[in-house]
Amino acid sequence: MTLACQIMVDGHGVAWSWHQAVERMAGQLASLDNPLLATWASDLRDIGRRVLAQIDPPMAATMAAGMTPPLAAALATWLFRGRFSVEEREASGAAAVLGLAFVTEGAFRLRRGIPSG
């Protein structure tokens, strides 16, 4: 866990850092020329893959789900300016910033038919 955190501090993503940390530790165990430790290295890789399966896809889906509505709404106001009011166009900048921060609520003011404010 500490090694994965150190790799993340270097600027790498969670899933990649976890995979690298597990592979390094398993490689060290396997290189010790001990059959029992080689088995543990194999087990460590298996556990690492199982943890990785829980980290990567769900987190990516969560992030995409949070970002898509406000970013899509902001993009629509920029591409189709004539279809949006001045207030909606002004709110699109905040929606884009909130979308980049994974805050879905930025899209709420841009929904059609709902008065802003």
Image: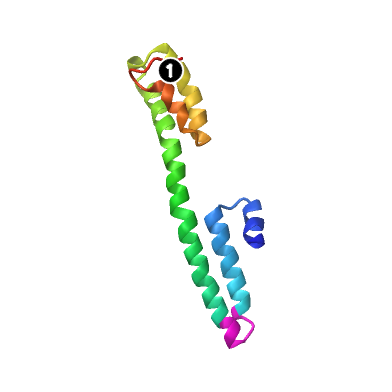
Part of the protein shown in magenta: 30-38
Total labels drawn: 1
Residue that protrudes farthest toward the top in the picture: 86
Left or right placement of residue 107 versus residue 101 in this view: left
In the rendered image, residue 2, in percent from the top left (x then y), is placed at 66, 60
Q: Quadrant of residue 73?
A: top left
- Residue 41 included in the magenta stretch of the image: no
| Residue 93 x, y percent position in the rendering | 49, 23
Left or right: residue 15 versus residue 87 is right
For the point 62% across and 78% down, which residue is it? 29
What residue would you read off at disc 1?
89
Q: In the image, is residue 94 above or below residue 102?
A: above
Q: Is residue 63 left or right of residue 9?
A: left
Q: Secondary structure at mark 1?
A: helix
- In percent of the image, x 44 and y 13: which residue is there? 87
* 49, above or below 61, in the image: below
Above or below: residue 33 compared with residue 87: below
Q: Amino acid at mark 1?
A: Arg
The x, y position of residue 110, in whole percent, is 40, 22
Colouring scheme applied when the structure was drawn: rainbow
Task: Inspect the magenta stretch and tell me whether residue 32 lies in it.
Answer: yes
Label 1 environment density (alpha carbons within 10 Å; few <14, some 14–19, many ≥20)? many
Q: Identify which residue, 73 or 10, lies in the foreground.
A: 73
Residue at 58%, 53% in the rendered image: 12
Can residue 53 be seen from the camera position used here? yes
